[in-house]
Image: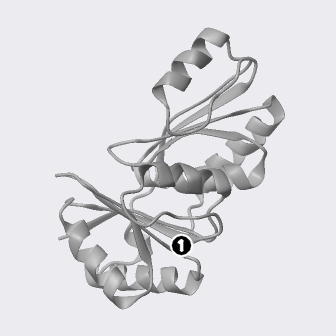
Amino acid sequence: MIKLRTYVYIDALQPQLAAYMATVSQGFLPVPGDACLWVEVSPGMAVHRLTDAALKATRVHLSQQVVERTYGSLVIHQRDQSDVREAGRVLLSRMGATVADRETCRIAWQETLRGMTPDHCVLINRQDRRGSMILPGQSMFILETEPAGYIVYAANQAEKAASITLINARAVGAFGRLILAGREGDVDEAAAAAIDAIQNPSEA
């Protein structure tokens, strides 16, 4: 039996998130404005069956597939939103599931730090080389979620809401992690949008 952990539909990838996803993409690179579907299931190997069904039924492109023993994730995208929505319906049908069967996202950690010090910024920038850099004096927002995949929706909604810099958006594994930086007011707006996204994830 396949368990649906994460099912998140994004209507239009924002520029920073699309660029970040492209740095880890193993397949077709997403571009800003693409519709996107992030699905995470258990056991991990089941992701191949679902990927096969989605690609054969629609015109979506596969940008990422992570297959672990416990969890498996797939990311598909296409400029036409209807293709991505249809791919989602195909996946759910193949699983015998509905969106309502996905796991409820839990916030494992959230925190905002003000006026970051140079030493702290340097360390973070050296650790997270796929995103942008955080600068001394900026505020930083950290969000961790379980399951991990919901973090991409939080990142996209945060980028829509405010002028922030995307530092990290890790959405695979046991926990997802989002790190944003920017001016204090912008970070507060983005944080509120990210938390709202986690509490009210999209259904496509």
Tell me the quarter of the image containing the N terminus. bottom left
Could you tell whether 14 is left or right of 69 in the image?
A: right
- Foreground: 59 or 185? 59
Disc 1 crowd, CA 10 A, few/some/many (<14, 14-19, 20+): some
Quadrant in the picture for residue 71: bottom left
- Foreground: 65 or 172? 65
Placement of 64 over or under 188, stated as above or below:
below
Q: Position of residue 54 (x, y in %)?
A: 35, 81
Identify the residue at image location x=52%, y=69%.
36
Q: Position of residue 173 (x, y in %)?
A: 32, 45
- Foreground: 52 or 43? 52
Identify the residue at image location x=61%, y=18%.
121
Q: Can you see residue 18?
A: yes
Identify the residue at image location x=72%, y=26%.
139
Placement of 201 over or under 176, stated as above or below:
below
Q: Position of residue 204 (x, y in %)?
A: 55, 76
Figure colour scheme:
one colour
Callout 1, which amino acid? Glu
Q: Can you see residue 196?
A: no
In this rendering, the count of numbered labels is 1
Q: Return the residue at label 1.
A: 203
Q: Secondary structure at mark 1?
A: loop
Could you tell whether 137 is left or right of 111 in the image?
A: right
